[in-house]
Amino acid sequence: LPGLLLLVALQIWPIAYTVGTSFTNLGDGHLISKQESIDSIIANSVREVPNAPRYLLSVAVKDGADPATGEAFYLLTEPSGKPLLGDKAGLADLPAASVEKAGNGRITKAAGYQILTAIQVNARKDLNEFAVPTTEGAGIKRVGLAEAFQGKANVSYDKASDTLLDSATRKTYIPRKASWVPKDGQGDTFPQGWKENVGLKNFSNVLTNETLRSGFLKIFAWNMVFAVVSVLSTFVLGMLLALLLNDARLRGRALYRSMLILPYALPIFVTALVWSSMFNQDYGLINKLLHLNIDWLGDPWAAKAAILITNLWLGFPYMFIVCTGALQSIPGDVLEAAKIDGASALRTMRSVIMPLLLVAVGPLLIASFAFNFNNFGLIFLMTGGGPFQDSNFSVGSSDLLITYAYRLAFSGVSPNYGLAATVSLFIFFIVGLMSYEGFRRTKSLEEVN
């Protein structure tokens, strides 16, 4: 049961949520419902009524409620000194005997309520839009920490025509592409859009939009090369070192093995940043030692080579550990029988050691391919997906699909989580299909046993 619950919470639910997001326009400016966008626009349009008196204000929550998330209440004092209680339902009288006031008349204590400090008030972003409703289109809104004013909204919503009217500019706004845009096409759109279902639009964008499609295919090609070369290079180096240190005649094997796994023990973000500085063209260690002047991180091909070298350093200790364990599990009598049969070292390696080694290592190679296919940390820390060519900052020369999806979601003027989720689904299916084929082929290795 715990395993099933964790599977649902950590695997199935994130996948289902990502699938759902890919069919929406979720992104910056499109995070809330349509009604919430209307309420937010109206609340932000509230302006102080000229010549209206101001209230003394204390912000409070119910006793025992969380100051950061509890329902907010405004404890108000009229110019006449009368205490009032304001919430999302409206104004109500507050018994004078239940409150204590400061010398200026501001409420400092009220029975059943906890007064928030200045830090707690400033931390609550919801108070910026909160207004105590009074009459239609009007309300009491906070200004600063100790005052509130009688305000009136400049924007009103007409449900029949599904439009917003700004009384200050006399502009009418209509819904279009999940945003409120000027009906006459002149002026700015309200920043508060809403989340809605867009069907297969995101999938169509990835497959038909020329910029996205060309970028996607270019990144996919490099992504495949990066994953395959990373797995093969780390496996070959790790295996050769494991074979060398598996020789019983070698002294100090334990010390050598401990030293070889050091790169694996260091955090990747530290190692990636260190290698990034070593590849610096002007003062990097690599150019200085080899007397070179290569712009490792500024040239597209050099950046890819630098990433592969760094990943080789980071990845071979894992393969070394795995291969060492697999080699030590091979029965000695099998190797002895091959020797008696007259098999050379190379023939023993090809016909005995490698098949038995791949039985244990094969599935791990597939898992390593999946990991490197989505190796976000290395790319992000070393190059950030760059260098970028032709002033196109959406697609980088060293981008993987996962860093491309990240840039779509969190970078640019208007981050689009729905489109990024769609790219993530493409990654999911690509890795899934390749992994399935890889596991299917590794079944033939089981016959070795």
Image (spheres, rainbow, N blue to C red):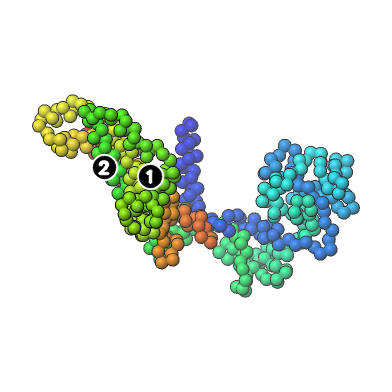
Q: Is residue 289 visible?
A: yes
Residue type, mark 1 in image:
Phe
Task: Report crowding for label 2: few under 14, some 14 to 19, many 20 or more residues within 10 A (C-alpha).
Answer: some
Residue drawn 64% across the image and 68% down it: 173
- Which residue is label 2 attached to? 236
Would you call the spot at circle 1 few (<14 residues within 10 Å), some (14-19), or many (20 or more)?
Answer: some
What residue is at 62 percent from the left and 60 percent from the top? 192
Q: Amino acid at mark 2?
A: Val
Q: Residue furthest left?
A: 342
Q: Is residue 216 visible?
A: no
The residue under the point 43% across, 40% down is 267
Which quadrant does the C terminus fall into? top left
Percent of width and height locating residue 5: 49, 35
Q: Secondary structure at mark 2?
A: helix
| Residue marked by disc 1 | 371
Task: Please provide percent x and percent y for residue 419.
Answer: 47, 57
Residue toward you, 233 or 420: 233
- Residue extending furthest top? 333
Horizontal placement of 37 versus 412: left or right?
A: right
Rendered image quadrant of residue 438 = top left
**Total number of numbered discs in the rendering:** 2
Q: Say above or below: 172 vs 139.
A: below
C-alpha span from label 2 to label 1: 17 Å
User: Which one is in front in this view, the residue at disc 2 or the one at disc 1?
Assistant: 2
Dot label at residue 20: none
Answer with left or right where residue 249 lies relative to residue 202.
left
Q: Is residue 173 above or below residue 366?
A: below
Q: Residue at x 48, y 45 (%)?
A: 14
